[in-house]
Each structure stands twice: as structure tokens, then as C-alpha cells.
Image: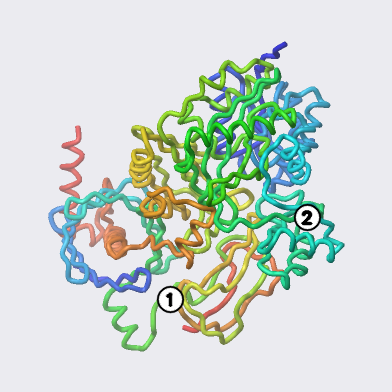
Amino acid sequence: MTTPIRKLLIANRGEIAVRIIRACRDMGIKSVAVYSDADAAAFHVRLADEVYNIGPAPSNQSYLVHDRIIDAAKRSGTQAIHPGYGFLAENAAFAKRCEDEGLIFIGPKSKTIALLGDKLAARATALKAGLPLIPGSDIDSANLVSALKTAKSIGFPVLVKAAAGGGGKGMRVVTSEELFEESLKSAANEAKSAFGDSRVYLEKYLPKPRHIEMQILCDQHGNCLYLGERECSIQRRHQKVIEESPSPLVTPEFRARMGKAAVDIARGSGYVGAGTVEFLVDEDKSFYFLEVNTRLQVEHPVTEMVTGIDLVKEQIAIAEGKKLSLAQSDIQIRGHAIECRIYAEDPDNGFMPSTGTLKSYVIPAGPGIRVDSGVVVGSEIPIYYDPMIAKLIAWGKDRVEATSRMKRALEEYHVSGVESTIGFHRVIMDNEKFVAGELSTRFLEEEYPENVYRLLTDELRERAALAVAIDKYSRERKITAGQSGNHGDAAARSNWKLTYRRAGLRQFGGSR
Amino acid sequence: MARYQVTVDGKEFDITLEYRSEQFVASVNGRNYTVTQTPLSEGRSLLLIDNESLEVDVHSHNGSGERHVFMAGIEILTTIEDYAVAQMRKAAGISHVTMDDVLKAPMPGLVLDIKVHQGDKVTKGQPLVVVEAMKMENIIKAKQAGAVKAIRVQAGASVEKGDILLEFEK
């Protein structure tokens, strides 16, 4: 039985809210946006059909408050809620609440989210489904003697991870036995304060892994597909900054094996909807299960570009109860796509967030370019949320063409008023190892150990100096197009100004 | 004619400009360029430097000589002075019209740690203060070498954007 969705609420903000509103438009579905006080004039609010204020700027008083979202859904008469990514996307309690209220949550069932959100339970599910796991073990952090014994049997260096973890919180690399006790305690404490759950476990530390993940789509009728991989090895602070599909490492045979593993865990967990099974790939090309993200990923556009499948539309169709219209053999990878995340951050200052107003904002276009942007000129970049402002995606017939299009688009992209990572991406696109496809999650720390990306060249310094001098001269002497000046002002009689006025008249006269 | 001194990332540029028949004739550290400027919007213009096209934003900061230039995907901090003023300043032994004689909080947040003490000599890139904002720890580093004259905040304090964290020796 299918339930057509006619109205859908997006429980998110920024570029992903815009992305989902666009899918709604494509499908003829009315879109409902929610917004905090800081987002009253945000781009997603401007685009949506209906909008509801859900409270003050801090997300724990607005975008994260279940009651406020549910209330907006009820008031607007929506049938479904799309959580996007982040905020409530992997919150099992919120998904359960939607189920109880008779609202369609666009994502897997709440019990699947709960199962896969617990890393230990996810590992057990993966093991049962026959997936390769990184050698590791459940431990009792209170029992140091037995925990140390387990660590030694795995062998140092070992990774301590939080069972409820994510984003690198509650995670420690322990290089030797002497450091084990201290690291274990601090990881457990951090996990306790971040997630309210101090359980930790151990994993063998892989020195130079690649992060490769598999996109899956499963309907409510037991059909499950994999849509190829994405490589997301270039990360800072355990957060992805550049992603691509296909991975330069992955062969069709490798893809089929990894895809089968992803489908196996999806079936083993009763998965419904779009999801991502993350793997780490060792230097000997062995892959190991990492975790399942039970939501749409930030980097989903690269998969869309190479498969031609609109993942948000598929999510909605699945939630309506429709059967997948594709078979595995219909999924073809065509060409290559790369995504650069554009953050309002200063790359040469430890990627520190930069807040302010976008004074100018020109997004690139042209063959093979897609920009999923959450902002427009004049947008405020508030301090309260993730500082990602847009995603720039380039498609080409192969990796070389995709990279050259990305470089072209990065040159066209113009942002002022806040710092951005555009210059950083330009440097990476020219990096020899990147060009060669030699990636690992340690890429940035190995290639740029000082965290300095040398964005400034001598030529740029000179150009900047000249631009500043001309700006000052023009302002002080009022050289501004169309400026009429002040009659009777002594300066207005100066030769340069008269000359300029004549020039201006000629300009305006000639433009018609 | 005007003569300026512009400092970009520690490098000084001696620039003379003359506006003649709708064009700037510029000399930058002795290299000559012809430049036309077309304003696009507030602070933003199109420069044709010897016919090479460059879109650039220049934003001034609290009325000082500080200018933020946005081009080629990055923000570049600069200072500009009249050349004569810069010469007098140098003759008087004042090192620079510093934009960095104080360290300001670049964002609102919580001060987690102060990595330096009063009197410390710091080098460019050295971590100074750790501020938590946007749920992330942000390490604020020295933009240039200097000595810490005073520490104006304590760990645990909440700061607003622009609050002074440290003072440096001039």
C-alpha cells in the first residue's frame, strides 16, 4: 500500500533544507520549512511554501526540540518529516515520536536507528551479517587489568572509541601500554559528557586507512540496492572536506564485494530508506566495516552525479511505500564526480569558523558544475550552527576532467565578508598526491604538517596591495561610477574630477 | 598623484598612483602597471591590470588603515598608510601601525585555555588561546611574532566577538 506525500516538513536548515525543498518542488509536494530566530531571512525560508518559527537561535532551543518540530508539523498538516543530516537525523527517539504521532519519518524505523547508532550493537550486527570487522573488542573501562590484557592481544597502537560516539569524541589513539590507562579514562569521561554514555571499546589502529563508503537504497518490500562508493579520505578533525565517486582505488570487482557487504548489513538490520555503510580500507586493500549512517549524507550529490539517481526523491518514494523502480543491474557508474565542501572557515588558522555577513557571493556555473548552496548574498553566517555554506560538485567524463572543472569552478567562486575554504580547495586540487589519487585519512596531516596551505603567493600579495591602494585613492577622491559630486565643492573643480565626469557621461551615453 | 605604503603579510609595497584619462598608472615596488577600475557593488570592483581581469573586494575595518581583501578564494589582511606617514613613523622608531597589537576574539565563545603567559615572546603561528565555539575547539594562533604585554581574559570566561583577549608589545 502506498501513501502519497503531498506536504513535507524539513526539520533542518542551510543547504540540505534547500536541497530537500528542491526535491519537493520536483515532485509537486508542498514544502514546509522551520526556522530559528537566527534564520528568519535564511535562504531555505525564502524558498519554502510555508514556514514556521520554532524558537531561539541555539539549536537546543529550536532545531533539536522534538515538541516544536512536531507542533509545526501538526499546525501545517504535513504528512512527513525529512530530518536532513545532523540535528535529529539519527535520533531514534525523534523517529519513534514521529511513528507514534502518525507522521512519516523519512528514514529507517526508529529501532533500526537505535540498533545501528550504538557502535557495539552495529559491530555485532555486522559480524552476524558476515562483514569484515577491524580486530577489536568490547571492554569494561572500569576493569583496567582485563582491558589492558585485551589491548595487548589486539596490539598497540590501539584505538579507544566511544560506543555512542561520533565526530571523534571519546576517541583516543594509544601508542603504548604506559599511556593506556590515562587515555582509557579520558575517553570514557569525554564519552560520558558528550553522549551521557561512558561505554568504550577497542579497535586495532590502522595507520593509513582510506575512508570509502557505500550508498544503499532499500524499500519497504525487501529490495535493497547499492549505488556505488564514495571516497571521503580527505578529512580535517575527523570531518570530511573533499569527497568523490568513484574511488580512484576501487575496481568493479572490489565495488561488487563492498556493495554486497553493504546490502548484507542492510538486510541484517531490516534497513529501509537511503543509508551509507562506511568502511576503512587498509593499505593491502582489505576493507573493514566502520559504521552505518542511517540518513542522507552531506556528500550524496557525488553519487547522484555518477548514477543519475536523485537520492532525495528516492527517499520520499520509499517513504510513500513505493517499490524501487531499479534493479542492481540498472545501476551504472558514469564518469567521475568530486565535491568540495565550502566552509566559512580560515584554513590557515586551524579551520577556525568565520562569522559575519556575505557581502558578495557569486557561485560558479558552466558544464559539469553543481552548487548546493544554503546562502545568498547578504546572508548572515551565524555562530550557532555548522559553518558549511555550500557544496561545490564537479562532474567529468573521468577524474582528470572532473578535477579540471572543479579548478575552473573554484576560480569563479567569489565570496567576501567571511573567510572561506575556496582557496584551500584550490591548493588541494593541485596537490600531486591528490592528482595521483594517493589518498588516506592522514592526507592533510602528512601533506601539510604545519597546517599551512600557502594560499598566498607573491603575485597575490602584490595584486592585493595594488587593489587596496586603488580602493583608497578612489574613495578619497570620490572616483565612483555615477557619483554626481557636490557642486561648489572645491574638490569638484579639480581636473581629475572633471575628467572623470566627462568619462562618466561618455560611459552612460555610450551604453545605450 | 598619491604614494602609499601597503603591508601584506609582512611584506611592504611602495605604491604610487596617478589617475590619467580614466586609467590608473601605478608603480608597485618599481613595477609599472596600467589599471582600470569598474565598481561593481559596495567595496567590490573589477580591475583590469594591464588587461588582466581581476574581481576583488576591499573592506575597511573600524576606520583604521586595516583592509580585508577578498580574491582568489581567500581573505588577505593588509594595512595601508600614506607613504610620508609611514616614513615618519619608521623614523620615529615605531615598528608598524599594528593591526595586531591586540588579539581579539574572532567569534563569541568560551575561553578554554590560554597557552601563553605575560611577557612571553611568541612566534608566528604559535597557539595563543583556545576558544570553544560552534561546538568545536578553535586554536587562535599568532598572526605575527611579538611579545605578550597583558592577558585580558581567563580560562572559563565567555567572550563576545571582538573582545580583547591579549595585548602585545608595540
- From this view, report whether residue A118 is shown above or below residue A180: above
Q: Identify the chain of the residue marked 1, using the numbered disc in the image.
A: B
Mark toward the viewer: 2 or 1: 2
**Residue A414 picture location, percent across and down:** 38, 47
**Residue A194 picture location, percent across and down:** 75, 55
- From this view, report whether residue A493 is shown above or below residue A27: below
The disc at residue A401 is: none
**Residue A165 picture location, percent across and down:** 72, 50
Residue found at the very far top of the displayed protein? A1
Q: Identify the chain of the residue marked 2, using the numbered disc in the image.
A: A
In the image, is A153 to the left or to the right of A211? right
Dot 2: within a 10 Å radius of its alpha carbon, few (fewer than 14), some, or many (20 or more) residues? many
| Residue A495 in view (yes/no) | yes
Residue under pointer 2: A200
Residue under pointer 1: B98
**Residue in the picture at 65% in, 74% down:** B153
In the image, is A476 to the left or to the right of A61? left
Dot 1: within a 10 Å radius of its alpha carbon, few (fewer than 14), some, or many (20 or more) residues? few
